[in-house]
Amino acid sequence: MAPLRCLVLGAAGRDFHDFLTFLRRRPELRVVGFTAQQIPFIAARRFPAALAGEGYLEDLPIYPEEQLEELVQREAVDLVVLAYSDLSHAEVMHLASRALAAGASFTMLGPKHTELRTKLPVVSVTAVRTGAGKSPLSQAIAAHLRGAGLRVGVLRHPMPYGDLAAQAIQRFATPSDLDRADCTVEEREEYAPYVDRGTTVWAGVDYERILRAAEAESDVIVWDGGNNDRSFLAGGLRICVADALRAGHEESYHPGEANFRMADVIVLNKVSGARREDVAALRASAARLNPRAELVEADLEVALDHPERVRGKRVLVLEDGPTLTHGGMPHGAGLVAARAAGAAELVDPRPYATGSVKAALAAHPHLGSVLPALGYSAEQRAELAATLRAAAPDAIVDASPAGIASTLTPELPVARARYAFVQRTGASLLERALRHARAGDPPT
């Protein structure tokens, strides 16, 4: 029989991982291309044949997801494979319905076929939704392990938004590494907090090779997930962060529900700002969906470095981008910090937005007087800077983890909002991660 022709639905992350770890290795399957969604400027690229390996002599095309039905017909697709995250269960089934209506079968790959194994102890941090607070927790764990004398290798969920061949294996240990890689704003938001603390972070496209390279320099591997995707690593200590401000999402989003059900520890985050009934609802969900998991409550504490620049002033709030866009949050730490510091007025960025920034705000009408830190390309970074200058606030509250406002608009005063993970209840999660790392338990 001829191989089944496969189309992979993705967003420059799990799609490539699922291809490299499973799909390309099966002679009964033949991938004819990828689609792209969620992340701007990543369609119309090609996945390099040099990374695809034996049997793939030409680069694989990447198309906009909007062309799904046309591609199924034109490329005689037999099987559509879903391989990206932070989709509601309804959205998953809409994609399935589109594939089925076009004549193809629909599937997604699971842990058994896509997780990588290592001899090192693993701590994996995932989430129910984008913006739940997994990166501050991952950063706190990595810092605690390093403080105990362990060599920590952080594997960050893929963000290869440029030249895929050049980004096969990425290692970031110094700020100059970020500069040499010409990292986007979104990449810097994830990598810079580790680099600033002296922790090496690994990312890229080929995670089998990335993991082996990290193993050579590490005593323990920490997985920092992207969006609400599952870990790429087998076994270890699995931690899932659930956002108490979005109770109910733990059983209505893919693959966040899988993370919630698989976790050894469920962190109920942002509890101080949540309603008691929502925290109780999360606890009830955990008891029903994953009764074996340990539950802890936590917060993200926000600190502003120059509150005097905000007090009584007209300020524009620049927030972490993904949290607001596909994470669906109306605001982040920046708005909290601005209000706490006594800002007189929040400047609405929408009348001043230009180009792709204006289009992004229009596509996310749930946003109010905050601006996501968009910078997936040099052109978009320039448009973001132009939007900030046109708004002409007295100051900018910059809650992007990358701290980009001062480089985009050095003429405007900037107050940086940073947030840190603080556990409220339960035995210390940082100490549990340390005990796991020191025990050297192999994945199960």
Image (cartoon, grey):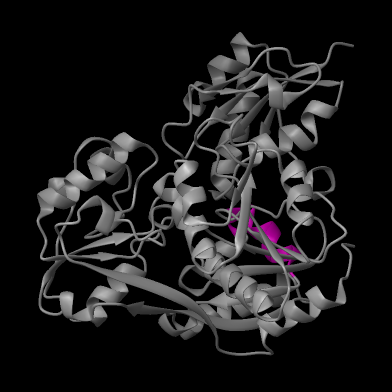
At horizontal 75% and vertical 62% (from top left) the residue drawn is: 218
Q: 288 or 163, which lies in front?
A: 163
Task: Locate residue 27 relative to residue 247 in the image: left or right.
Answer: right
Q: 10 or 403, which lies in front?
A: 403
Q: Splitting the image into 4 quarters, where does residue 240 fall?
A: bottom right
Residue 352: image x %, image y %? 13, 47
Task: Locate residue 345 relative to residue 429 in the image: left or right.
Answer: left
Q: Is residue 392 magenta?
A: no
Residue 121: image x %, image y %? 82, 66
At horizontal 86% and vertical 71% (from top left) the residue drawn is: 440
Task: Locate residue 169 relative to residue 408 in the image: left or right.
Answer: right
**Span of residues in magenta:** 252-263
Instruction: Report the label total.
Output: 0
Residue 301: image x %, image y %? 43, 81
At horizontal 55% and vertical 39% (from top left) the residue drawn is: 160
At horizontal 25% and vertical 46% (from top left) the residue drawn is: 384
Is residue 104 among the parts visible in the rendering?
no
- Quadrant holding the C terminus: bottom right
Residue 289's place in the image compared with 101, above or below, is below
Q: Splitting the image into 4 quarters, where does residue 224 fall?
A: bottom right
Q: 248 or 112, which lies in front?
A: 112
Residue 382: image x %, image y %? 25, 40
Residue 33's place in the image compared with 312, above or below, is above
Residue 168's place in the image compared with 278, above or below, is above
Residue 218's place in the image compared with 14, above or below, is below
- Quadrant holding the N terminus: top right
Q: 146 or 44, which lies in front?
A: 146
